[in-house]
Structure formats: C-alpha cells, structure tokens
C-alpha cells in the first residue's frame, strides 16, 4: 500500500535504540554490520545470553554474576594490564575494584535475601541513590599503611608516622571558616554577643585559628612511637614555602634535600625509567649497568611496557619509509584538502591517512546550515519549518546549548536568505559534485560546490558558504587555495554540462561569526584566473600539492589552526607532541 505517494516499506521502521536492544537480544541482528563494529555488541549479547541461561536454570544473583564474569574473560586481561602499570594499568585497577565491589554487594544481598532472584537484586541495585556500603572502616588485614587526616589520628599511634605537605598556607590554614549564611555569627548574636566586624576582631579570630592549627599539628606529630617524618617543599624558584611549624618542631634542625637525594615514585614506569637511565649512563660502573640490564630483561620477559630495548624511542626502525601511495597511482585531491595541505602537510596526512580528525558540534551546525541554504533557493521555502524537519537528527548536547545553536542557525540562514535576494547573477546549480582530471598528470580533482552562478559574460562564479568564525585577510583572497582550485576545475570541464567552461571568479560567503556583528552576510570575492597577473597559479599549486601528498615526509607548519588541531598530540611543533620529534 502507498500513502501520500510514498511506497510502504517492507518492514517496520525501528529507532536506533530499538535496533540496539534487538541486537543485544539476538546477535543475528548484527549480520549486516561490519565485523569490527559489531564485535563489541556481539560480546555483550553473548554475556546477556549467559545470564538468561543461568536464570532459566534457577541460579541466584551471586551465581549468575559469577557465570557472567567467567564468560567475559576479563579477569586475565585486566590482571595483565594492572601488572603492566601505566595509564591502562591504573584503569584496570579501577575496573577490578569495581568488580570486587559488585561481588561484595551481591554477596551481602544474598546473605540478607537468600531466596531472592536476579530481578530483585537488579531492582535493589538500581534503586540505590547512595552506595549501600557501610560507612564504618574495615580493619586492615596484615601489614598496611593507613592514610587519614590529623583529626582521625587522635588516640592512635604507629611506629612510623609521615606528615606530608606541611606548607605555609595549607598548614596553618588561616582562612576564615564559616557557612554560607554565617550561622555561627547568628548563633553568637542570638546568645547576646554583639557582632564585631573590626580589624581587631578579625585578628583575634585569626589568632584562634593559628592556635587551633598548631594543636592539630601537635596531634599529628605525636602519633609516632619511634620515627616521625615531616615533608615540605620550597626554594628560590617557587612560591611554595615550608610551614612555620617546622621550625617550631625542631628549631634549626630542618634538613634540606639535595639533588643527590632524588626519590623515585613507587610505580612500575618510574622503576623502568630509572633502570633504563642506569643502563645508558656510561659514568656508572659496569657491575651496576649489568645489574640494571638484568632487571630490565626480567621485566621485559614479564611484558612490562618500556622494558624491552626494542620499544625504546630512536631504537625502533621506521615501520615503512615508502612514499604515501594512491590507488592506481592517481592522486585524489579536493579543493579543501589543497587548502589544508598548504597550511600544514603533517596535519593533512594525520587527518586524511590516519583519521586523526574530529567531528564536533560546529561541523554539525555547518551541515545543517548548508542543507537549509540549498533548500532556501526555492521560491516560497519556509526555511524555519525545514530547520525543524532536520534539526533533531543532530546531537547538539544539552537543552540550553541546543537552543543556543538553534538561534545561531536561524541567524545564519536569515543572513543567507537576505543575501540571495535580488542576486545579479543567475543561479545554475547548488550542491554540485564534480570530478576532473588534470591533463598530462596523474591528478584527479574531486569536490562539491555550494553554488554555481552564471555572470553576464556567461562565465561560472563559484560561491563557497562558510559558517565558521575565521576568515582570510582581504589581501590573501586572490590567492585563496580552495577558491583557486574551484576555478581551475571549471577550466577543466567540471561544469561543462551547464555550458560553463570559463571561470568568472569565486567567493567565500561568511554567514557565521566571520560575517561580523551586523545582520548581513559578508562576501570575499576572488577575481577570475584570467584577470590575475599569474593565471596559472592555481594549476601550479595543485601540481605542487599533489607531489607533496605523494611524498614520504610531511612537514609540520605553525599556523592559525594549531590551537584547534585534533592531531596536535602527535605534532612536533606542539608542546604536547614534542616527544615525537
């Protein structure tokens, strides 16, 4: 059957949520999805099937959870990652702690309600707004280090006590305490005490705080039976200063640390770093270097990252030193990629060949505005209604930000509608795709133009809509790479089907912040290639860029886009990417 001229679908349309639920219930739903995309959902579907089977056999919540954990295979993987250390090891530690906490909770639940099923356990777990763990401390088993505040240490003693971070400004902390509404002062006032806001009252209060902080430090320092260690940092090159309490604790006896007293962090990565430094230090004795090498070999055999010399920077060979290859040896370029490559070759390579680019809300907003702009060319188009039709297909975050972006989109579309009224040139095409070949070279230019117009001389004028906040200088527009490639594509027959074989110029049409504070769009026009003093500059640029895109080395160049570059973590001109220099 057909409705409103549209043929009926052979299946009932389902939302993305419904499709995901169906896939998790039956992994066969993922048959048409690429394997690397479907793999995580398939693993989760198998675990759900394991849980369903355990419930069907009448197993309780604790047994069912154990079956799921065994089927996941995460125990060995997370344990290995935890022992390896590093950022992944820390994440594995947190994951294992979470699993232990879950098993502990299900054990307590089973003790309380031994006959309750899995559904009751899930209801109990999801209904908790505050974790159900006991607030009481559990006694440490065996030798352990207790970390607690000075207040909590009252009445307790240990053989060795370390009071760390005794800095001026932190201990004593003389900031005035009090609640937001000043209830302490109100209590005193209600008791008959007059409110005193003079400097003398403030100084008296600060004196009381100092005395209280001194007593608290005394409590912390007297918890040690045999040995007390108090630490602080300071120096001429820092604003940090040791607390005045140190000199009160041992006048004239504060022992400053020296460069030779370096202490290593108690972590696997720090140990590997120290061992590597010892092995490579020719000033060390031969015996020490051999001992460090033996420890590194043992750690490398255990799979600890960084222990194997084959993983050390500058010792690993280049994986592939061949130039970047192209299908059929034809370089595929687009007008936007030419502009990107001229700004920074390394960024283009990382974003294009490695996929280091990122999509964000700004790109989604630009997509919406371009779509509405192509629709708004029709007479009588209600672009607000069109905006309503497609707006919910994009994720613009929270409600308030969604509304803000909606207002921005309406403003940009309104600028475009006013701009296109009474245009002197004839509109030929919108969102026009093209593919042309550079004669005599293995270069293919592929792209899509927002608008193609015909001027009074029958030449093509390309309009490229911009929705961002940046724009080139007016003095740079005649050599703008993207517009120049559009004009070159016109001379190569990109729009010959419309009877347009000569370019009459190109323009950037700014609708976003780059348009300025006014209500009108801003247009930056590039003159026709034939009117330029160097009419072949665009073709020369394309050939140069194509040669660079096929090279084996890509140069990082500092430019205005470095701040927002998604690949800066791997870029040597950026501080965060300096390690790859």
Image (tube, helix red, strand yellow):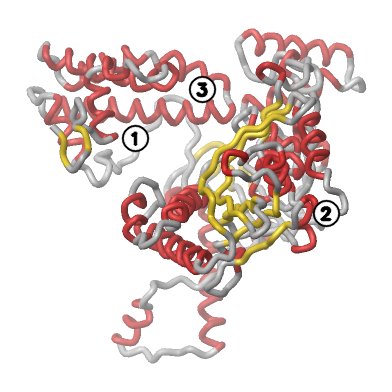
Mark 2 is surrounded, within 10 Å at the Cα level, by few (under 14), some (14 to 19) or many (20 or more) other residues, namely few
* Secondary structure state at the residue bearing disc 3: helix
Residue 348: image x %, image y %?
69, 36
Q: Nearer the viewer, mark 2 or mark 3?
A: 2
Q: Residue at x 58, y 50 (%)?
A: 452
Whether residue 562 appears in this view of the structure is no
The residue closer to the viewer here, 335 or 162, is 335
What is the C-alpha distance between the residues marked 2 and 3? 64 Å
- Picture quadrant where residue 60 is located: top left
Q: Considering only vertical position in the picture, is 253 above or below 510?
A: above
Q: Considering only vertical position in the picture, is 549 above or below 466?
A: above
Which residue, given by chain and number where applicable, does mark 1 sit on? 138
Which residue, given by chain and number where applicable, does mark 2 sit on? 532
Specify the quadrant that holds the C terminus: top right
Specify the quadrant that holds the N terminus: top left
Q: Residue at x 43, y 59 (%)?
A: 405
Q: Nearer the viewer, mark 1 or mark 3?
A: 3
Residue 360: image x %, image y %?
51, 46
The disc label shown at residue 82, or none: 3
Mark 1 is surrounded, within 10 Å at the Cα level, by few (under 14), some (14 to 19) or many (20 or more) other residues, namely few
- Picture quadrant where residue 501 is located: top right
What is the C-alpha distance between the residues marked 2 and 1? 81 Å
* Secondary structure state at the residue bearing disc 1: loop
């Amino acid at each position: 059957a057909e409705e409103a001229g549209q043929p009926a679908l052979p299946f009932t349309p389902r939302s993305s949520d419904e499709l995901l639920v169906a896939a998790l219930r039956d992994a066969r739903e993922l048959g048409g999805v690429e394997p690397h995309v479907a793999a995580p959902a398939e693993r989760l579907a198998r675990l759900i099937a394991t849980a369903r089977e355990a419930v069907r056999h009448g197993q309780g919540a604790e047994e069912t959870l154990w079956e799921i954990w065994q089927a996941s295979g995460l125990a060995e993987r997370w344990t290995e990652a935890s022992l390896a250390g590093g950022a992944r090891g820390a994440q594995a530690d947190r994951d294992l702690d979470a699993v232990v906490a879950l098993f502990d909770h299900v054990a307590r639940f089973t003790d309380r309600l031994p006959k309750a099923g899995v559904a009751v356990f899930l209801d109990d777990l999801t209904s908790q707004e505050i974790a159900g763990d006991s607030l009481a401390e559990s006694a440490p088993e065996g030798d352990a280090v207790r970390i607690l505040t000075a207040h909590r240490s009252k009445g307790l003693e240990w053989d060795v006590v370390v009071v760390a971070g005794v800095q001026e400004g932190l201990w004593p902390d003389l900031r005035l305490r009090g609640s937001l509404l000043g209830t302490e002062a109100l209590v005193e006032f209600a008791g008959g005490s007059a409110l005193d806001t003079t400097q003398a009252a403030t100084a008296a209060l600060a004196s009381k705080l100092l005395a209280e902080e001194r007593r608290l430090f005394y409590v912390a320092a007297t918890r040690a039976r045999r040995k007390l260690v108090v630490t602080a940092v300071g120096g001429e090159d820092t604003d940090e200063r040791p607390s005045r309490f140190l000199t009160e604790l041992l006048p004239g006896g504060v022992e400053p640390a020296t460069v030779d007293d370096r202490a290593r962090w108690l972590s696997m990565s720090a140990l590997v770093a120290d061992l590597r430094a010892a092995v490579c230090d020719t000033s060390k004795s031969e015996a020490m270097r051999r001992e460090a090498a033996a420890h590194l070999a043992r750690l490398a055999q255990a799979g600890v990252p960084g222990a194997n010399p084959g993983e050390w920077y500058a010792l690993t060979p280049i994986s592939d030193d061949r130039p970047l290859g192209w299908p059929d040896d034809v370089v595929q370029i687009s007008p936007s990629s030419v502009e990107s490559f001229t700004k920074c070759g390394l960024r283009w390579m990382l974003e294009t060949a490695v996929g280091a680019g990122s999509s964000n809300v700004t790109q989604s907003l630009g997509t919406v505005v371009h779509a509405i702009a192509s629709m708004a060319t029709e007479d009588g188009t209600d672009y607000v209604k069109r905006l309503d039709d497609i707006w919910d297909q994009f994720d613009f975050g929270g409600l308030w930000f969604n509304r803000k972006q909606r207002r921005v989109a309406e403003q940009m579309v309104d600028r475009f509608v006013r701009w296109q009224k009474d245009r002197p040139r004839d509109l030929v095409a919108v969102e026009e795709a093209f593919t042309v070949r550079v004669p005599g070279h293995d270069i293919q230019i592929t792209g899509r133009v927002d608008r193609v117009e015909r001027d009074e001389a029958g030449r093509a004028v390309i309009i490229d809509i911009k929705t961002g906040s940046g724009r080139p200088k007016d003095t740079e527009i005649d050599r703008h790479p993207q517009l120049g490639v559009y004009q070159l594509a016109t001379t190569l027959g990109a729009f010959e089907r419309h009877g347009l074989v000569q370019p009459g110029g190109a323009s950037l049409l700014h609708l976003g912040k780059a348009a300025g504070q006014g209500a009108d769009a801003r247009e930056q026009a590039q003159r026709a290639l034939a009117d330029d003093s160097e009419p072949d500059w665009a073709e020369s640029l394309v050939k140069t860029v194509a040669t660079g895109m096929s090279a084996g080395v890509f140069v990082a160049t500092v430019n205005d886009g470095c701040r927002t570059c998604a690949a800066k973590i791997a870029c040597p001109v950026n501080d965060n990417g300096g390690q790859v220099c």
